[in-house]
Amino acid sequence: MIDITSSLLTARSFLFVPADRTERYAKALASGADVVVIDLEDAIAHDGKDRARALLDGAWGDLAHEDRVVIRINGLDSLELADDAALCASLGPAGVMVPKAESAHSLAAFHARMGGIPLIPMIETAVGYAAVDALARADGTARLAFGNIDFQADLGMVPGPDQAELAPARFGIVVASRAAGIAAPIDGITLETGKGGEITAATHRAIRFGFAGKLCIHPDQIAPVHAAFAPSPEDAAWARRVVAAADDSKGAAIRVDGRMVDRAVILLAERVLALASQTDRQRR
């Protein structure tokens, strides 16, 4: 059973750091990112996997915020899995990110092997996308993440700047998450590493689709991602009115600002207030 109070479920930003760059761990945790993803997969060359695991194992005790650390392992069909699994079971991170997830059965079996550590399956292949509903419902799945770069490579896609070609995949991942009753998913990376308009536009696109988090590859991406997710004062005020009216109604039908309010609207208002609270805490 996933702890629904876990910050993993409400995190907006997930910042990758290579497992073999231990000097970056503390900097990543101090960057303002909600979650730091220590990467044993793409960031590490094949002949450097053992060294990366050893470095992560040795540095773990010095981390100040292990509850904000996720480890991205190698794939469930990888020869590295046994060693990755043993390390994760020993360290007990906040979650394990599973790349190229394709089988709900394999995912559930891995979750049992991990003793209940929450999983973030990455949808990065055509096979994974075809199984997205089952992956979302698999035992251990906390949230889905979209590996947009690997996904388009697997399908031979060459999306334009607006990535309109990936819209069906993004929509499907959000729908699968909602239908499974899990937290809203995490959108993929943006290659621009500065604080320019591309990361802001990409985050706003993710929000329009219903994503509630963003994978990041540079600390400079954190502030614009959080700014995009932060509700406006007007939105926060509306959400407070909705929640207050719902509390006062004791289950009766209500109207706010001249519009009927149902359970879906109340849930949206609660989400807005949660985001507003995160933003306020970050500014203190």
Image (cartoon, rainbow, N blue to C red):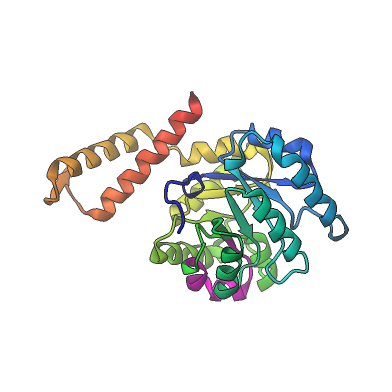
Task: Say above or below: 180 vs 96.
Answer: below
Left or right of residue 6, residue 101 in this image:
right
Any magenta on residue 129? yes
The quadrant in which the N terminus is found is bottom left
The image position of residue 37, as x and y in percent, is: 65, 47
Q: Residue furthest top?
A: 284
Any magenta on residue 133? yes
Task: Say above or below: 57 vs 83.
Answer: above
Q: Which residue does the image show at 21% across and 54% down from the upper left? A: 262
Q: Which residue does the image show at 88% across and 59% down from the upper left? A: 47
The image position of residue 30, as x and y in percent, is: 64, 31
Left or right of residue 271, residue 195 in this image:
right
The image position of residue 164, as x and y in percent, is: 55, 62
State the predominant SS element of the stretch in magenta.
helix
The region drawn magenta spans 121-136
Task: Say above or below: 245 vs 185.
Answer: above
The image position of residue 16, as x and y in percent, is: 68, 47
